[in-house]
Image: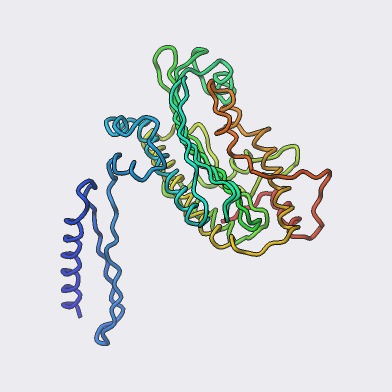
Amino acid sequence: MASASRHWARFLHSMAAVVSARLRPHVKPRRVKIVTSVMGFGGGMWSLSFFKATKEEESVSTQASKWMSEPISGVEYLEENSKDMKCRMETLIMRIQAEFCRALEELDGEKKFHVDRWLRKEGGGGVTCVLQDGTAFEKAGVNVSVVSGTLPPSAVQQMRARGKKLQGDKLPFFAAGVSSVIHPRNPHVPTVHFNYRYFEVEEEDGTKQWWFGGGTDLTPYYLDVDDVVHFHKTLKKACDKHNKKYYPEYKKWCDDYFNVTHRGERRGVGGIFFDDLDTPDQEQAFQFVKSCAESVLPSYIPIAKKQKDKPYSYAERTWQLLRRGRYVEFNLIYDRGTKFGLYTPGARYESILMSLPLTARWEYMHKPEPGSREDELVKVLREPKDWV
């Protein structure tokens, strides 16, 4: 048996070498790990797990062929400056945007994203992707922005209010981020939001400050505990790779931030949220943000796939529209990203307000029936739970 195992191991490694040799020339070589497990021998039954390949980072030009649009900074510039954090972040968010859009298109099965690449005269621009009136998604927006210029005094003051010690009133800045809000058609499919961003500002004396921010959160209309647990476990796994303290800290931050204060309830069942992250160092902070951004697909797509074809009633649809009204209230009254976008010179309002649904509803003094599924959700929104 041992001899047979060695024989198969040699065979699999030789096959791996052939696969590596036949890779496309514009992709860096793969490291191929062979894993074999013998379930039984003598009866002729083998169970083999092999060719677990981990691909090295592709070149920017290779990645760009899969993106939704030409990047704002240009492929050549990103490739020539591939070690600069500004370029690394732009490359990451272009990839995340494309991967999420393709997954949503496949899930919808009917509509494709409208791709709108725009530029601002003050510096930079963005790529706004919107899918509307689809089979699965009433409105899905996935936006990339890469902007630069000079911060006006109002934006500088807002940052100082958050504890940033910035010298000067008009400061050169760079900001890059990907943000998305998905409004599904079926009320059994939750809305999801994510945003990951990098900010760099230069003070009057030439000193540069940088930080990352972002998060992912879920807003269901009907509570499916299994779905919420899956969502939180996926985010926790991404956080735990970097620091075991991140998930509990950023989960609480999320619950506290996405709070519709005047309603006394959270916007949804939370997730993670963080801002002004500049520790332990730039590389480790970037790797953490990368892990979080890459966790969006596995955290949300299985839930949407599971629920999107579930039957629903007129009353359930009405409840969904009422909850969307709460979503709009938070985004327009409290959301810091919306406010910052509107304060920024050359703001593109269509992209900033892409998070708003096509339809929403407000009823005077509406209260769910005690003991109903709607009431079950509201109780969780008023008292956040620990899901994992």
Can residue 309 be seen here? yes
- Please state, as top left, top right, bottom left or bottom right, where the C terminus lies in the image: bottom right
Location of residue 206 with respect to 190 vertically, above or below: above
Q: Residue furthest bottom?
A: 43
Place of residue 283 in the rendered image (x, y in percent of width and height, measured from the top left): 36, 36
Can residue 211 be seen here? no
Place of residue 72 in the rendered image (x, y in percent of width and height, measured from the top left): 40, 31
In this figure, which colouring scheme has been used for the structure?
rainbow
Could you say which is closer to the camera, residue 215 or residue 322?
322
Place of residue 344 in the rendered image (x, y in percent of width and height, measured from the top left): 54, 23
Location of residue 311 with respect to 362 vertically, above or below: below
Residue at x 69% of width, y 49% of height:
381
Could you say which is closer to the camera, residue 31 or residue 317?
317
Number of numbered callouts drawn: 0
- Please state, as top left, top right, bottom left or bottom right, where the N terminus lies in the image: bottom left
Place of residue 372 in the rendered image (x, y in percent of width and height, measured from the top left): 77, 60
Instruction: State which quadrant residue 6 falls in.
Output: bottom left
Could you say which is closer to the camera, residue 32 or residue 37?
32
Q: Residue furthest right?
A: 365
Residue at x 53% of width, y 55% of height:
108
Location of residue 168 with respect to 286 vertically, above or below: above
Could you say which is closer to the camera, residue 259 or residue 190?
190
Q: Is 28 positioned to the left or the right of 380 in the image?
A: left
Instruction: State which quadrant residue 376 falls in.
Output: bottom right
